Amino acid sequence: MNILTFDSDDKLNEAGAGIITGVVQTNKRAVLGLATGGTPVGLYKHVVSDFKRGMFSFKNVTTFNLDEYIGLPDDHPESYRSYMRQHLFDHIDIPLTQAHIPNGNAPEPKAECARYDEMIEDAGQIDLQLLGLGHNGHIGFNEPAHALIRGTHVVDLAEETRQANARFFDSIDQVPSQAITMGVGTILKAKMILLVVKGADKADIVQRALQGPITTDCPASLLQTHPHLVVLLDRAAAEKLA
């Protein structure tokens, strides 16, 4: 585990973007696992900036997003498909046929989960998986549970997760109650995992995830078992680490 702490948000974002772009520069056919939410926005901004300077191309890159809400139209401003286009895909040269996001409107969600797992398997091992960290320790939308599901699956979102995401909607009533998420098993199979966490409100869960016992009650704690985990924190998020 390699933990790096930054004094400025911009330096953290620059470092995270540098790791992502380094993978693409090294391997033009890289397979990237991508995340959404407030945390990666600055990273993606730096990636786009570097791309526009002609530093690399995404033409042969394949991406798989961690998750998608169930029931939101694809063009809904808070769908993760809209998010990815707004913050990354519309600003780089990746063919959208190579940018994969679970279909939250599939008529048979379980079949969609199986299809998604098959696509990931066919693409080969994910070279870099980007992650954020939920207040309750979730990664992707893998919520705390007695047992965690290995592959892509439908999940009932915890009330704490819905409350945290309500800031992106007009009211919590508009936040979907279910999502499709990549499973923890798939996440842990990535060659490299990049965990990015910001803010004092995440300090407790950062300590639990990185230094606490490995338990499904804190799904992110399973990242301690990964052989190549890089963690980028701001000072506030790192405050309670020993």
Image (cartoon, grey):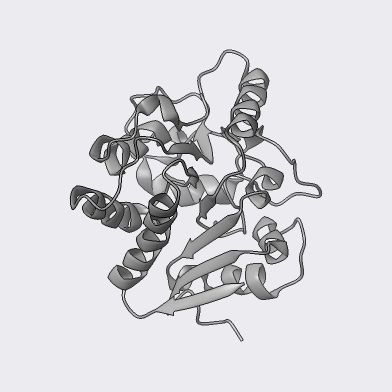
The quarter of the picture where the C terminus appears is bottom right
Give the residue drawn at x 62%, y 50%: 190
Residue 67: image location, x then y, percent = 53, 38
The quarter of the picture where the N terminus appears is bottom right
Give the residue drawn at x 55%, y 49%: 127
- Above or below residue 162? Residue 53 is below
In this view, which residue lies farthest toward the left?
53
- Let me know if residue 170 appears in the view: no
**Camera-nearest residue between 60 and 81:** 60
In this view, which residue lies farthest toward the bottom?
242
In this view, which residue lies farthest toward the top?
107
Give the residue drawn at x 57%, y 45%: 126
- Let me know if residue 166 appears in the view: yes
Residue 185: image location, x then y, percent = 71, 46
- Above or below residue 34? Residue 225 is below
- Above or below residue 205? Residue 129 is above
- Above or below residue 24? Residue 65 is above
**Camera-nearest residue between 5 and 55:** 55
